[in-house]
Image: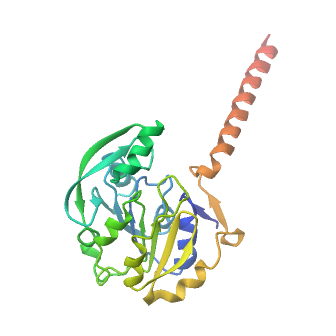
């Protein structure tokens, strides 16, 4: 049976390749956004895995709760200190950010509407207090340029995900931006194993045996099927819909001619 991928850059394919031997594993999705559009966790959820979603935007946190009623959804932002934090909300896009400079880029180029809200903030360590000492098979961080602050709130002695996947480029750009937080991971005993053009993948020293799974990019032998929501499929879907509409019009016209 093909593995249906929902994530935007085949992150779920790479993680499944490394971890498919685990039954009913545990994940943490920081910056979860949507329950299936560009979701790294959806394919795992369909295979019996369960985990924790961290999503500060109310509308997306509610969508996650409705789609995943048996999972934990924390409607908070993560930072290096606790309290409240200002979030720049980028409408209709998974680009909302606590970094003002990134938000201003979208405002200046006029591509998205922008407004600010105050949201509760926790550290990664306090948000995942219930998972201390337990197996977290993968943890993904996608917080649009705020990754370093999230990692500064992490206690690597008590929370040790097997695999960590962290967005490593400037938002909406291929330019890498990980120099500030990479030393946090290496000092914690994590080894960089793969870069997919958007994210960097790291393995804990306790699970170095998984490194071989990251030796090659997604390929035909992964037996992958794309979900209908995949951005890779959108042009094909639009073309198919246009052709379907044209055929419907032709059928209507022919029906009218036959009736006449």
- Quick check: 60 left or right of 228? left
Which quadrant would the C terminus be assigned to in this image? top right
Q: Which residue is depicted at the point 79% across and 20% down? A: 254
Extreme-top residue of the structure: 260
The spot of residue 43 in percent (x, y) is: 51, 64
Residue at x 46%, y 70% (from the top left corner): 165
**Residue 117 x/y as whole percent:** 26, 45
Residue 253 picture location, percent across and down: 76, 18
Q: Is residue 78 left or right of residue 147?
A: left
**In the rendered image, which quarter is residue 148 located in?**
bottom left
Give left or right: position of 244 versus 15: right
Total of numbered circles in the picture? 0
Report the coloring of the rendering.
rainbow
Residue 104 visible in rendering: yes
- Which percent across, then down, holds residue 252? 73, 21
Judge by depth and name the residue closer to the eye, 118 or 171.
171
Tell me if residue 45 comes above or below residue 189 in the rendering: above
Q: Which of 7 and 104 lies nearest the eye of the viewer?
A: 104
- Asked whether residue 70 appears in the rendered view, the answer is no
Q: Quadrant location of the N terminus?
A: bottom right
Q: Residue at x 70, y 39 (%)?
A: 239
The quarter holding residue 26 reads: bottom left
Residue at image point 65% right, 39% down = 238
Vertical arrangement, residue 188 with respect to residue 228, above or below: below
């Amino acid at each position: 049976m093909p593995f249906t991928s929902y994530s935007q850059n085949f992150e779920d394919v790479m993680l499944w390749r490394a971890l498919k031997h685990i039954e009913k594993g545990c994940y943490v999705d920081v910056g979860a956004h949507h329950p299936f559009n560009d979701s790294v966790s959806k394919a795992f959820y369909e295979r019996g895995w369960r985990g924790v979603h961290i999503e500060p935007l109310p509308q997306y946190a509610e969508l996650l709760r409705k789609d995943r009623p048996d999972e934990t959804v924390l409607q908070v932002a993560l930072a290096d200190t606790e309290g409240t934090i200002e979030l720049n909300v980028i409408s209709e896009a998974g680009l909302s950010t606590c970094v003002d400079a990134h938000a201003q880029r979208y405002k200046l180029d006029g591509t998205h509407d922008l407004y600010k809200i105050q949201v509760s903030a926790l550290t990664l360590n306090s948000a995942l207090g219930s998972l201390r000492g337990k197996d977290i098979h993968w943890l993904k961080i996608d917080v649009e340029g705020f990754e370093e602050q999230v990692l500064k709130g992490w206690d690597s002695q008590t929370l040790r995900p097997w695999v960590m996947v962290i967005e490593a480029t400037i938002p909406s750009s291929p330019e890498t931006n990980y120099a500030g937080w990479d030393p946090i991971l290496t000092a914690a005993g994590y080894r960089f194993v793969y870069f997919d053009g958007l994210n960097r993948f790291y393995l804990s020293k306790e699970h170095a045996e998984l490194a071989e799974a990251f030796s090659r990019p997604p390929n035909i032998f992964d037996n992958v099927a794309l979900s209908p929501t995949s951005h890779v499929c959108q042009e094909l879907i639009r073309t198919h819909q246009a052709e379907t509409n044209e055929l419907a019009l032709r059928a209507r016209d022919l029906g009218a001619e036959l009736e006449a």
